[in-house]
Amino acid sequence: MADAIAVDRLVKRYDALAAVDGISFRVAAGQVFSFLGPNGAGKTTTTEILEGLRRRTEGDVRVLGLDPWAEAATLHRQIGVIPQGFRFFEKITPKEAVEYYGSLFHTNPDPIRLLTQVQLEDKAHARFDTLSGGQKQKLGLALALTNNPEICFLDEPTTGLDPTARRAIWQVIRALKSEGRTVFLTTHYLEEAQLLADQVAIIHHGHIIAAGSPDEIIATRGRPERVRFTAAPALAEYLRGHVGLPVTVADGRVDVELGQPGDALRVLAAADASGVPWAHFETVQDTLEDVFVRLVGQMDDGALKSEGAA
Amino acid sequence: MRPARILADFKVVVRSYLRNPVALFFSLIFPIILISLFGLIFSAAGSTTVAITVLNEDHNSPQSVALLSALNNTTVAKLSFVNWNSSSFAKNLGANDDAVGLIIPAGYGASLAAHRPVNVTLYTDPQDAAGAGAAQFIVTGVTNAINLEAANGSALVGIQQQNVGSAIYTYIDYLIPGLIGFSILTSPMFSMVDVAASYRKEGIFRQLSLTPLTRAEWLTSHILWYTALTFVTAGIMIGAGLVLFGAHVTVDLGLVPFLIVGPLLFVSLGMLAGSVAKTPESAALIGNIITFPMMFLSGTFFAVSSFPPALQSFAHVLPLYYVIDGMNQVMLFSNTARAATDAVIVLVIAIVIFLLAIRFFTWRDE
């Protein structure tokens, strides 16, 4: 599959500070790519460079084969963007806004059809300043679609939205993918990335610290699957002596890390044989969020240690 | 530049404006308030008389009565008589808020009859410079006439009064072009400075930069809107001047160039000021620094020719001066040649500022 976005050794410096420090990645056409990282990691800087809103310091960036800064005008006809914290003219209605963008792009979309697509048709005639946060983001999505873009850049489209509004945006993102568009999504919500993204990259301090599909990242960087009992610490003592697997105790829960799936039966049999009463058991797996928090945390600890040594 | 995109943006600008009641109030009602206010203040000033408090110590001598009746005959002096002690006269004037006082000394009549020099004493208040000047002129004029008569002379030079221009104008007639110029300046300057800074802060320029709309198209649609607004405002002001104050100004096509190049200039200047500023606060400051001197020194409320020479030279570098002077030439003096020169000067400045605004107004970050 052709690459919709290709980034090679991208660097963006603000004075001496490298906000983005030599990152490379590819986004295949038709995929949902989620770009993750804590605040200040370089997410928005990278996104704005890809959108042609910010000039890069070094490296090569191609979006749909174009240089986003030098060929911005051509690129902007082929991409749709919701910037972070989308704002618009306060007294203008969604229907008027779509018509306005249609005239600017010379595409003449059907405003009501487009607003229906983002589930905003009931607010077609309400002024922007009366819309809720979620409705504003939906209008941002609708405007990003007025030029029938090949790539949609969504920069934190669900930040600050209630759960229902977030799910509505997710539906739209899935629809975009099913229409064959490429989606470049940045978000703070890791579950969102895990649910929607084909590929993710995690950026931290200007470097990409993990990349791949969510499952790959969890499999390679996450902890093994665990069996979790709600039980007294005595159970942990017993299991340590009988199953030969790592056992941890925290908050009244006993976790046993599984080496392979078959281990689960041995652990349950041992727990049954222990005679220690337990209330509840479940198997737990790392989520993308667990992996993210650990990776970012480890890196910050490492950075602190090396600073302390120096 | 594509007309379709300019038109699309123009529609957004008009809708945003018309749906903002405060903005609408200021554009439509404010001109009427402004012209009524200044019309009332300054037309009253034109008919003011000078109140003079008189202490006549030369009790009803024929000569003192003649002096007082001559003053009275000027119709500009309004005399009131007191019976204070001359030593506390100045203090009493101050206590009574009387700005001008006159003492005719005892023996005034006798001195005149004997052809001996005698002084009347004129008291004026430095805080009321206009009243002091007027009183000085009136009293000097009257005493000169008395001196002339005493010397048995007769006047050789007479004065016949005419107003400037081809017809008789009142202050309101000068005020109309001035106030139209005032709104051509202030309305776009204040809002464009604000728009430039706040659209950047809110990311609306960034949003627009992702569309095919160009900065020149965006600026043009705003110029079109403020031009339309200027025509409406000018119409309201001229209408109010004619109806409320009986102004007699010439309204013809000669005004049109100023109502177009004026907004072109000041929308661009507002955008330029807003673009070079880093924050909305500094934008407002820069806007005020540019706007306020122009607001008062370009002939808006007072004719530039009445300024001291240094201030006149300064006024001549202010672009608004040429807008207002041009409209004065059209509306009052029918001096088409000078109006055309003014229009060309404003047009050249406007084009330069427009290009500078496009150059400095960026909507992407480096």
Image (tube, coloured by chain):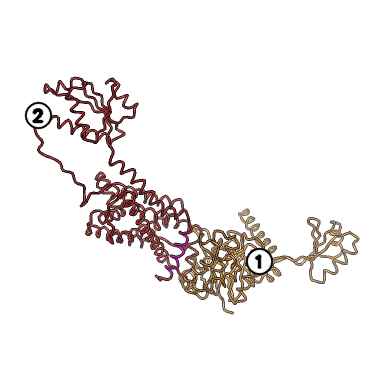
Label 1 CA crowd tier, 10 Å (few <14, some 14–19, many 20+) = some
Q: Reply above or below: B218 against B52.
A: below
Q: Position of residue A68 (x, y in %)?
A: 49, 70
| Residue at the (17%, 30%) spot, across then down | B143
Q: Which amino acid does label 2 sit on?
A: Ala
Colour used to depict chain B in the structure image? red
Q: In the rendered structure, which segment of residues is drawn in magenta?
A: B5-17
Q: Where is residue A58 in the image (x, y as percent from the top left)?
A: 50, 67
Q: Where is residue B111 in the image (x, y as percent from the top left)?
A: 14, 21
Label 2 CA crowd tier, 10 Å (few <14, some 14–19, many 20+) = few
Q: Which chain carries label 1?
A: A
Circle number at residue A194: none
Q: Split into 4 quadrants, where in the image is the C terminus of chain A?
A: bottom right
Q: Which of B224 and B239 is in front in this view?
A: B239
Q: Is residue B8 on the magenta stretch?
A: yes
- Do the residues indicated by labels 1 and 2 lie within the same chain of the protein? no
Colour used to depict chain A in the structure image? orange
Residue that badge 1 annotates: A167
Q: In which quarter of the image is residue A213?
A: bottom right
Q: Is residue B286 on the magenta stretch?
A: no
Q: Can residue A20 be seen in this view?
A: no
Q: Reply above or below: B98 against A24.
A: above
Q: In this view, does A61 lie to the left or right of A301?
A: left
- Report if the CB atoms under discs 1 and 2 are less than 8 Å apart: no
Q: In this view, does A33 lie to the left or right of B348?
A: right
Q: Which amino acid does label 1 sit on?
A: Arg
Q: Is residue B226 left or right of residue B252?
A: right
Q: Split into 4 quadrants, where in the image is the N terminus of chain A?
A: bottom right
Q: Where is residue B173 in the image (x, y as percent from the top left)?
A: 28, 50
Q: Reply above or below: B72 against B174.
A: above
Circle number at residue B151: 2
* Label 1 SS: helix
